[in-house]
Amino acid sequence: MPVVHIVTTGGTIASRIDPVTGAAVPVVAADELVAQVPALATLAEIRVTEFGLLGSWNMTPALMAGLARTVRALLAEPETAGVVVTHGTDTMEESAFALSLLLGEAGPVVFTGAMLNASEPGFDGPRNLLAAVRVAADPAARALGTVVALNNEIHAARAVTKRHTTALNTFVSPGRGPLGLIDDRGVWLRQRPAPSPPLPLVEPEPRVYLVKMAAGMDDLLLRAALQGGARGVVVEASGTGNVYAPWEAAIADLLAAGIPVVVVSRCLDGRVTFTYGGPGGGRALQDLGVVPGGDLTGPKARLALMFALGAGWDHDRIRAYFAALTAT
C-alpha cells in the first residue's frame, strides 16, 4: 500500500470542548486523531508525526519553516506517496502557501482540518482527513505540490482563502475555483496549478509588516514601521493599487530607507494594475518603485517577502521574484 505520513499541528480538527471553560481547545493527540478514522487503513499505510497542538492563530512563519523542514524530510523517504498536514483553518492558507513556496513542486502535501470540533454533532474532521489521505495516496496528485483539501474540494495553496468564519464550505479560490473534487470514486482533478517559483528554505525575516488601507486613515502605521526598524512592508491598497494621499510620502520614505514595499489589493479578486494618477494613485506608487504584488493577498505577499528577505535578497531580486510569482 502507499505510505502516507500525517503531520499534526493542532487546530479545530484536534479540539474538544473543555468542560470547565466551555471553550474548544486542541487536545487530541496524533495517534488518537488517526484512530478516529479506521477507514484510513484501507487507503494507505499511515505513519504519524506530531508537530504540535496549536490553535493556528499562533502559527508563525518561523514555525512554518520548521514544518516545511519536517515535511521535506518525510517526502525524501523513498516509500512516501504523500504527506497530509492537519492544521487549524484560521491560518491554513498561509501555512499551505509558505510550504508551496519553500518545497516547490515536491509533494503532494495536502493540508486539511475541520470547521467543527470533535465535541460537536456532525464533526467534519474524520471525513476531511479521509479525503486528504485519498488525495495524498493518489498517483495523479504527485505533481500538485501543496494543496488544501476540505469539504471534498481540492484548492491550490496559491489561490485558496478562508471566506467564512464558520461555514463548512469556507475555503474558496476566487477567480480560479477548486482544482478538483473528492468523491466516492476517488480524486477527480479538473485543472492543475501552475508551479510557483521556489524560495530558499531559510529562517524568515520577522520584521515585515502588513498595513491595510482604509478611507481617510493617516500614515501613522507606515511611519511607525519606518521608525521601528521594519525590514519590509506590504500595503493592502484599495482597488487596483491606490492609497490615501498622505501615504504616498510615507511610502517614499520607506523606499528611500531601503525598505521594500509590496503593494497588493484589498479586493478579493483581481490584481493591482496601477492605473490611476493623482495623489496616492497607483501610477504614483509605481513611479516611486514599489513592488507590485499581483493578485496575492496581503498575508501571502507578506510571507513571500519574509522568506525573500530571510534569504538576503536585495530589492531588484525581490522585484524579479514577485514578477515571476504573480505571473502564475
Image (cartoon, helix red, strand yellow):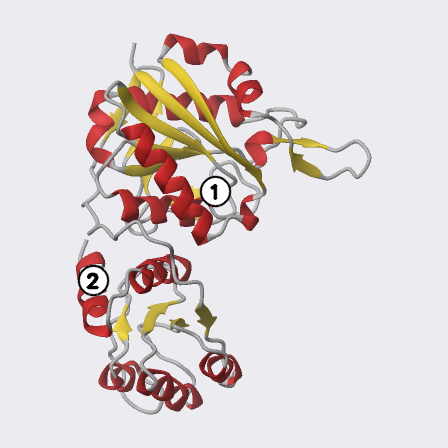
Question: What residue is drawn where x is 23% and y is 67%?
Answer: 318
Residue 191 appears in the picture as rendered: yes
* Quadrant in which residue 122 is drawn: top right
Disc 1: which residue: 170
Whether tag 1 and tag 2 are in contact, CB under 8 A, the answer is: no
Question: What residue is drawn where x is 19% and y is 45%?
Answer: 195
**From the image, which quarter does the N terminus lie in?**
top left
Q: Tag 2: Cα neighbours inside 10 Å, few (<14), some, or many (≥20)?
A: many
Label for residue 285? none
- Residue flagged by tag 1: what amino acid is it? Thr
Residue 173 appears in the picture as rendered: no
Between disc 1 and disc 2, the foreground one is 2
Disc 2: which residue: 321
Q: Nearer the viewer, residue 80 or 197?
A: 80
The image shows residue 18 at horizontal and vertical percentages of 75, 33
Question: What residue is drawn where x is 56% and y is 47%?
Answer: 165
Whether residue 140 sits left or right of residue 130 in the image: it is left
- Name the secondary structure under disc 1: loop
Q: Tag 1: Cα neighbours inside 10 Å, few (<14), some, or many (≥20)?
A: some
Q: Nearer the viewer, residue 144 or 204?
A: 204
The image shows residue 144 at horizontal and vertical percentages of 24, 35
Q: Nearer the viewer, residue 166 or 158?
A: 158
Whether residue 168 sits left or right of residue 208 in the image: it is right
The image shows residue 206 at horizontal and vertical percentages of 44, 63
The residues bearing labels 1 and 2 have C-alpha atoms spaced at a distance of 30 Å
- Name the secondary structure under disc 2: helix
Question: What residue is drawn where x is 45% and y is 77%?
Answer: 229
- Residue flagged by tag 2: what amino acid is it? Tyr
User: Mark 1 or 2 closer to N-term?
Assistant: 1
